[in-house]
Amino acid sequence: MAVLNQLPVLGMIKEFRRSWRALCSSERTTLCGPDSMLLALQLSMAENNKQHRGEFTVCLSDVLLTWKYFLHEKLNLPIENMKVVEHYEDIKKTYDDFLKNSNTLDLIDVYKKCSSLTSNYENNMISPIQLRDFLSGTEYAVSDEANPHMPESPVKCSQNDEQVRVLVKKIFFSYLSLLVNSKNDLALASILNIPDRGLGRE
């Protein structure tokens, strides 16, 4: 299986960490990767549905549709002829407020902050399209059996040993993230119901 080329993104994160005093107001700010960004968007959409329809649920197809539009819109890439769900602006505001209250920045925010640097990093700047491809998983090989656009339930799907190891690592990092940033609701959401404890929104 082909893997994503993570080097440009890792370089961007390293540059952000080196220059965090000029780019960020808090040293305890948590950086939000693709999985956490998608989770935050899903939770924001569910919260929006709760307000407009009374149910804290969201269809996976709507999440993926909004995810694609969200990446293009936030990276200032063309969005002509792209569909978007109702109340998108409300969803985006909920997403932004969620990250702000969690003391978290997503990778697009980090990208925009690093773009403002007047350092040698400008020569190695990742492009918006490269970042979009990284976040959406489109750099996977065509022959990959797994669909990188389709998030799976970490509990209900059948898992091999490698999947279990990846899941355990993510949960472990979520616990560590809470130690560093107690406001990180994304990390809390990742660990509260894993293993499945039947917990709902309350």
Image (spheres, grey):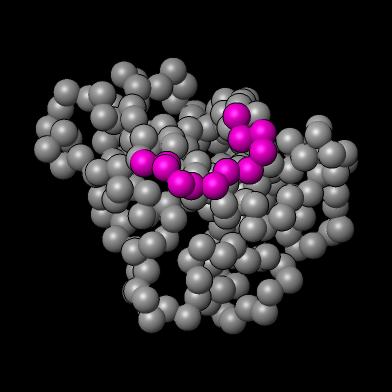
Judging depth in this view, the residue of 117 and 42 nearest the camera is: 42
Please name the residue shown 42% across and 52% down the image.
135
Was residue 99 drawn as part of the magenta stretch in this picture? no
Please name the residue shown 65% across and 29% down the image.
90
Q: Where residue 16 sits in the image (x, y, percent)?
A: 32, 33
Judging depth in this view, the residue of 189 and 62 nearest the camera is: 62
The answer to whether residue 98 is seen in the rendering is no
In the rendered view of the protein, which quadrant contains the C terminus? top right
In the rendered view of the protein, which quadrant contains the N terminus? bottom left
Q: Which residues are magenta?
A: 78-89
Asked if residue 69 lies left or right of residue 139, the reply is right
Please name the residue shown 42% across and 60% down the image.
137
Judging depth in this view, the residue of 73 and 194 nearest the camera is: 73
Q: Where residue 54 sits in the image (x, y, percent)?
A: 87, 39
Q: Looking at the image, is 48 positioned above or below residue 37?
A: above
Q: Where residue 93 sits in the image (x, y, percent)?
A: 61, 27
